[in-house]
Amino acid sequence: MKRILLVGAGHAHLSVLRSFAKEAFHGMRVTLVTPLARQVYSGMLPGVIAGHYRLDDAQIDIEALCSRASVEFSPGSVDALDLQARRASLEGGEKLDYDVISLNPGSRIERSLPGAERTLLVKPLDELLAGLDQKRIGRVAIVGAGAAGAELAMALGHRGAAVTLYSDRPTPPGVAGEQIAKALRRARVDFRPGMAVTAVEQGPVIVAGPSRQDFDLVILAAGSVAPAWLASAGLAVDGHGFALVHDTLQSTSHPEVFVSGDCATLRDAPHPRSGVYAVRHGESLAANFRNLGGGKPLEAFVPQAHALVLLSCGSRYAIAQRGGWTAQGYWALAAKPAGLRREPQFRWGDSPASSTSWSIVMIAAVAVAVAGCEWTMMVTPLLFGLLARVRMSAKRVPMRRPFRSRSTVPPRIFSS
């Protein structure tokens, strides 16, 4: 029997597992290789840091999801590929053969900044949480004011840390840049736009031009790079080391290799790297793996023009952005996941009864917002409020009140 090897449990492969759990996949043996049996869901990380969610609520049970999907779970990390022999090597020395391989290991934080070894990296997420547990959270510097850096700054600020956010840009990126800058100031984050960090010295001490300032902790959230073994294996990559893929998500140099999520670049239709697009990658992968098993032609992945981006602002408040449209408020947080299902079968995604209704309400909310009508700002919050009710209405999910701040602090998370 032919074997599909899934490397990494990013959004794309989680979507594949969800598809296989809902409808069994036959004809090929599937194995997932990933370091952890349980991992933190990135969409809920700011809420965990801010104290809104317990750590258990934000973890996905990968091993249980594999069991439901009839996929073999193999703990480990791939560090090399032999494309000619079709063999993946794990860090511990184990080797796994495959007929088809799908790569979804995510991206890494770029570490060319002098003194980067003195910082805590924002990725991997589980290592970030473990690192925060071991540090004194008082004066914190964050290098990089993208979405991850801004969310992290406001979440830590909500927990009482004195946060300084450094950016080499005059405003945060995106059409919601000004709104994000105002939200940072409301969250009492010392935002320093246009102040590029040049080094991190022993202390740690941030060096930004002539300025020098010491902190208890420095977190590096600037720039992302692909795993080095993608290029060293011989896969075709772009100028930044990300794998080049066709619209079927197959490598442009090796058709038996599929690449998805942050480490892939769609050669003919590049799009932003985000969880929304990664989930869509996964839906395409699941369909094409079924096509492979049935001897059918592969289908092309067509990226959507715009994706909804939600940025948590520390308190139960968020900024929403889609294309040129932006909005903000406590209601916007309703589209952020309020909690993962405690039962293994609901650890990822909505129950069948609620997913369709949620999608309808979501589409209606975004359609009204993008329409630009005079009553947009009145109707959109109501639709998102309805969205929150629908999303939380499954009998297995305890109802949360998204408009009240609540602190359920997990033990040993960010002890000061």
Image: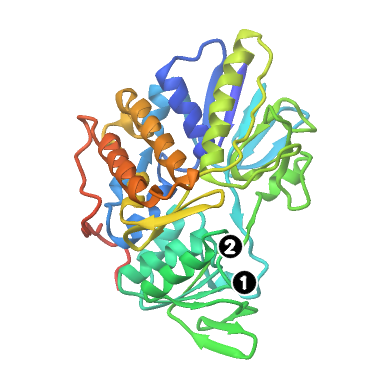
Does 225 sit left or right of 142 as displayed? right
Estimate the x, y position of residue 229 in percent, counting from the top left. 70, 46
Q: Work out whether residue 198 or residue 234 is closer to the camera in this orientation and state it.
A: 198
Estimate the x, y position of residue 252 in percent, counting from the top left. 78, 33
SS at badge 1: loop
Residue at left offset 33%, top offset 41%: 383
Residue at left offset 55%, top offset 39%: 278
**Are the residues at dot 2 and dot 1 in contact (C-beta closer than 8 Å)?**
yes
What residue would you read off at disc 2? Answer: 173
Does residue 9 appear in the picture of this structure?
A: no
Residue 411 lies in quadrant: bottom left
Q: Work out whether residue 317 or residue 11 is closer to the camera in this orientation and state it.
A: 317
Q: Amino acid at mark 1?
A: Arg
Does residue 291 appear in the picture of this structure?
A: yes
Does 218 sit left or right of 68 as displayed? right
Specify the quadrant that holds the C terminus: bottom left
Crowd band around label 1 with a 10 angstrom C-alpha radius: few (<14), some (14–19), many (20+): some
SS at badge 2: loop
Specify the quadrant that holds the N terminus: top right
Crowd band around label 2 with a 10 angstrom C-alpha radius: few (<14), some (14–19), many (20+): few
The figure's colour scheme reads rainbow
Question: Taking 202 as reference, is 358 above or below it?
Answer: above
Estimate the x, y position of residue 386 in percent, counting from the top left. 28, 39
Estimate the x, y position of residue 59 in percent, counting from the top left. 35, 44
Residue at left offset 48%, top offset 54%: 326
What residue would you read off at disc 1? Answer: 169
